[in-house]
Amino acid sequence: MTLLDLLALDFMQRALVAALLTGLAAPAIGTFIVQRRLALLGDGIGHVAVTGVALGLLTGASPTWTAVVVAVLGAVLIELIRERGHTNGDVALALLFYGGLAGGVLITGIAGQGAATLQAYLFGSLTSISGQDVWVTAALTVVVLVATLGLSPQLFAVASDQDFARVAGLRVRGYNLLIAVLAAVSITVAMRTVGLLLVSALMVVPVATSQQLARSFRTTLLGAMLVGCLASAGGLLLSAALSFRASVAPGPTIVLLALAMFTATWPLGAWLRRRSRLMAPFPEVAATPHRSTEHPHAHGDDCGHPAVPHGDHVDYVHDGHRHAVHGEHYDEH
């Protein structure tokens, strides 16, 4: 079966739309979570959301909506525990995470559902995404994108420096709760494609990949959303292709593809960071002149070494040194 034949299938079209929406929403809120140094927050909320899925299976309600409700309640509780900062707060969070996962497995069993049913929500599934799931995913994605892009200045201020945000008059506690709630919504958006246990990777890895190349927060945010879409769509198609020979869930392929993109961009990011450090303005220090006879060649426009404007002259970067011609010698900087 060719790629076009694969995309002609109804369930693949629904899965691809859901994957693209997930690739937009998860990295969008993940950028602020990474900025707050809470990269594992999504992992914890995902564990709690398992109980919400199980309640949906038990009651006959939509597992997506019950997961949204439970995940939002869990996110608010996690944020309140973290905010209080008790010494045993990490223990309380661990109890919450493990309780959510264990409760989900237990309730799923009581509902008479097998492990295969719950596995579709833990690691994603190609064939279980219905048309209603796509519409719900689209609506939740719009909510996440409108909030994250529309309030990005406020969310960035709170995520970067909470003391500055308070001085600026922002309601820090409210915005922290908003970030946690949006993270919970993003996780439920992603549970059909990436799965609840792997969604945290799609919130973090695209951001880390974008940070390798971007030099501003807005560029990082948009780059992370682009990487998220590429990883989600590519991983989904790869999963579908592999499923002809074995049973492969889309979540692992999406995450592994995102990690491969990070690995590919890391060397380029390291080179760009080193070049940026060399080209950055440097503090004024006492010059240590050396004679031109000690230098292998004279610098100029075609010498091939980076030229850095410095006041009324130009410095050249050469073998880790920055120096400028001054008469018959070079001034080191």
Image: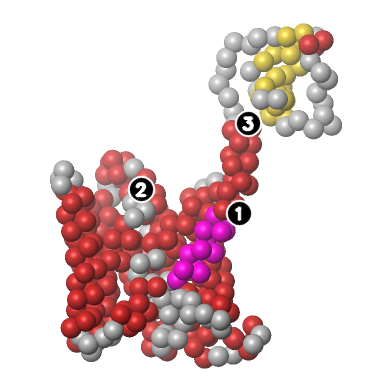
- Disc 3 marks which amino acid? Leu
Mark nearer the viewer, 1 or 3:
1
Q: Does label 3 or label 2 sit earlier along the sequence?
A: 2
User: Residue 278's mark?
Assistant: 3
Q: Which residue is mark 1?
A: 264
Residue at 74 percent across and 13 percent down: it is 330
Q: What x and y, as percent, mark residue 145?
A: 42, 67
* Distance in Å between CA atoms under marks 1 and 2: 23 Å
Residue 75: percent from left, percent from top: 24, 62
Of the 4 image quadrants, the one containing the N terminus is: bottom right
Query: Vertically, is 160 above or below 1?
Result: above
At x 76%, y 30%, the residue is: 305
Instruction: Give the label on residue 64, or none.
Output: none
How far from the left and from the top, in percent, is residue 163? 28, 40
In front: 100, or 316? Answer: 100
Q: Label 1: state its secondary structure.
A: helix
Secondary structure that dominates the magenta span: helix
The disc, 1 or 2, on the residue closer to the chain's N-terminal end is 2
Nearer mark to the viewer, of 1 and 2: 1
* Residue at image location 35% in from the left, 77% down from the top: 119
Residue 298 lies within the magenta run: no
Judged left or right of residue 309, residue 250 is: left
Q: Is residue 256 magenta?
A: yes
Identify the residue position indicated by label 2 in the image. 37
Indicate the quadrant containing the C terminus: top left, top right, bottom left or bottom right: top right
Q: CA distance from mark 3 to mark 2?
A: 28 Å
Q: Nearer the viewer, residue 101 or 44?
A: 101
Q: Residue at x 29, y 84 (%)?
A: 114
Instruction: Count neighbours of disc 3 (C-alpha within 10 A) and say few if under 14, some if 14 to 19, many if 20 or more.
Output: some
Amino acid beneath label 1? Ala
Residues shaded magenta: 251-262
Helix, strand or loop status at disc 2: loop
